[in-house]
Image (cartoon, grey):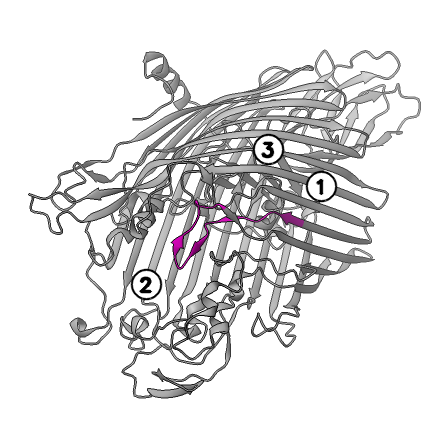
Amino acid sequence: MTGLVTRGTGWIGLLLLLSTLPLRAQTTGKIVGRVTDAQTGEPLPGVNVVILETQQGASTDADGYYVILNVRPGTYTLRASMVGFTPQVVQEVRVQINLTTEVNFTLQEETITGQEVVITATRPLVQRDLTATAAAVSREELVVLPVENFTDVVNLQAGVVEGHFRGGRIGEVAYLVDGVQINDVYDRSFAFQVENNAIQEIEVITGTFNAEYGSAQSGVVNIVTREGSERYQGSLGGYVGDYLTTATDLFMGLERISPLHARSIQGDLSGPLIPGYSNVTFFVAGRYVHNDGHLYGRRIVLPVDQDDPRAQYVTVDGRQVFVPALGDSALVPMNWSEQHTLQAKLTARLFGQHKLTLSGLWQGDRGKNYNHLFRYNPDGTPTVYGRSRSLLATYTHIFSSRTFAELKGAYFTNEVREYVYEDPLDPRYPRDDALRLLGGNFSFYRGGAIMRHFRRRTETFTARFDITSQVTLRHQMKAGVEFKQHTLTVRDFEVKRNPSTGFQPAIPPVHTPDHVYYHKRPIELSAYVQDKMEFDYLVVNVGLRFDFFDPRAEVLEDFSRPRTSPRRPAPVRWQLSPRLGLSFPISQNGAVRLAYGHFFQMPAFDYLYTNADYIYDPERGLSRAFGYAGLEPEQTVAYEIGLQQAFSELIGLNLVLYYKDIRNLLGTRIEVIAPGFDEPFQLEKYGRYVNRDYGQVKGFLVSLERRMAGGFGLGIDYTFQVARGNASDPRAVLIDEMSGIEPEKQLVPLDWDRRHQLNTSLTVGEAGRWTVTLVGRLGSGLPYTPSIADERIGVENSARRPGFVQFDLYASRLWKLGPVGVQLFARVYNVFDHRNEIQVYTDTGRAFPNLRYYSGEPQGLNSKEEFLRRPDFYSAPRLVNIGMNVTF
């Protein structure tokens, strides 16, 4: 077992206590405030404060204070009323996930019956109870951004570089939808995409986070989806678009305008399930989106082998080139994507104190990943198919305005399949040595196909019970327990067609190097307790989290004997992680915060279970790493200090300094098969995954916000960051060994170490009529390792690629036709059509040319420049989408 503290009876008692408490990931906020007499300033007890849109409310206590918990994120209207006083209404009250919104009332003695005072609230630029770096994007803000999905919103946040949160590796982020984590444990990616038209609010936490969040080291993306409305309403819209670029010599296939190159249609509908009965509502949303992509190939040849009867020799630049079968030379998209999504939610409010929510999601997607070597043989690359389903049931019981409980049950499954032909015995599969025989120097493949068949399926069942209580005016307690049962099934094999199979397609036997299969059912248990203390001079978030993991698998006792060693059950892992956040209001317009925490995460499960049969393959050697079910959690200790300062009601500044110490990261170790035993391949080397890598991140960010007013709003943030470690890739030790390079014994820049990042956002417009938003991202170049002829000539990642610049635009115009709204909009990505070099040749540091351009000749059908000028080394060109949306 592993842990942060010495085991003892005191800790055992604490764990037993925690196991009886509930767990939840926060999806709501709260409203607090005080009601006083406008003439005397004295508190008013017994005042009713109600949220008009939800009818949630509370009465003030003897000191005039009130608290309303469990408020979904959104914008609301509050009304305070008491006999003998004129009611007061406050509009535009914004509630955010996990934060406190303060709304105070001053009531006048009533002089005219039926009169009420109406006030418009202003969201404070300084959120005094914010103890970590977090950004909330509301539904209203989301629709005016030039983004396709929530991942685009995440990448706009300070400290995020292409999915890496504050220097962490990909996969160190917890993705939650309505309080339930949706990470696919196979690779720690999110299992499905929540479409923008179904999102109520997105919270992106890039710094330290509270104990209620687990299974993450670097950040949290918390999505709350929409619920049904009390009246019928909906929308229907879509767009068409195409890439418009002058670089048609680089991006083949984009010469002509094709309006249906990119297309989407989406809609949503909500309202009462039974007309006139608003206690049971529904929300349903769907979307279809397709994009042919910007990377094309040409079907010069077909994916067959050299024995095809259509084989012939073709003359190219005076050379005779053997081709098994010529194609029709048609242009073929090679990085296309398509997705269908259907999401529904049913909400029932029963007897005033009970709420039942049932939601489900179905998503199917398919597409291809570009492979440059197949540019003249595009049909030889596999298509990737995905299918996701999710079901969530939530029961909420409100004991009082200060205490509520939730019971959640969730199930989701995510399936991925990848193949050229669905039937692995399809006679169209070529010989398995076709690619090796039909390659060549500086040449695209002249036939053959990728023979891999891959399928994985992840199922996760989650059950939890939680309770939240405003125990006193100053203390909000949360605690809980959560149980997860995972089922992970993976089948990965290479179709064989060679003399041993009679030149017919065949599936290799299971549990051999050419056919990996495993079916595992690990379990997780977690619990936490947390107290949020809010005083006038200090806000404290303190918590303790417990995580337990049982891989339910076996490991070797002696790794030098992979075939003959006895096996034993893999050890279970547990850990305690304390979290602390402080916020010190230094004035009405400023606050300083400090945060510290321990964060743990099990490695992606594929690293635990892949190749767990320990069958050594001499043909692959070190290139085939073995999984290890006894891996320990990866650990991060994070520190943060921040300052919020408002200079006026419109302009605010945020400054953050942070540091992360990352240990137990996934790496690899080389094992040697021992002589003297009944082991084949004695003294051969193989690799297995272990916890060995280390990383360190430090940086600061500065953001300036000018709130939308007077027709424009502005946001600017700058991040300076240094992300270093001993390895960017968990397989670095094996890669270095195969290349004859000594592994790094010093900290070097990690692959995603972008030292400077500047994000800008400018919005101009008139509310309810027209809006234009321009978003810009500018970043310094990412590192690479310089080399010549595959021989390293410098320290790992000691050189830098060119920088990154991209501006995206959203523009819309809205017309109101009675209850119907008609909106025309345009989204333009990469407005200035900038050629960002996202990959480079390591001998020149540029996407083109490289030093090999000046020596050697191609042996295939293509020219040397066609082979070396790679469109996938550049970011996508300008994409223009034009659409319409109708609301009713």
| Amino acid on which the number 2 mark rests in the picture | His
Q: Residue at x 50, y 30 (%)?
A: 660
The reply to whether the magenta stretch includes residue 384 is no
Neighbour tally class for label 2: few under 14, some 14-19, many 20 plus, Cα within 10 Å: many
Circle 2 — which element? strand
Where are the magenta residues, as a range?
Answer: 777-798
- Work out whether residue 851 or residue 480 is closer to the camera in this orientation and state it: 851
Q: How many numbered circles does the render carry?
A: 3
Are the residues at dot 1 and dot 2 in contact (C-beta closer than 8 Å)?
no
Residue 352: name its quadrant: top right
- In the rendered image, is residue 888 in sight? no
Q: What label sits on residue 453 in the rendered view? A: 2
The quadrant of the rendering that contains the C terminus is: bottom right
The quadrant of the rendering that contains the N terminus is: top left
- Work out whether residue 859 or residue 96 is closer to the camera in this orientation and state it: 859
Circle 3 — which element? loop
Q: Position of residue 503 (x, y in %)?
A: 21, 76
Residue that numbered label 3 is attached to: 351
- Looking at marks 2 and 3 on the same chain, the residue that comes earlier in the sequence is marked by 3
| Amino acid on which the number 3 mark rests in the picture | Phe
Does residue 348 lie above or below 451 as drawn?
Answer: above
- Tell whether 742 sits left or right of 229: left
User: Which marked residue is nearer to the observer: mark 2 or mark 3?
Assistant: 2
| Amino acid on which the number 1 mark rests in the picture | Ile
Neighbour tally class for label 1: few under 14, some 14-19, many 20 plus, Cα within 10 Å: some
Residue that numbered label 1 is attached to: 716
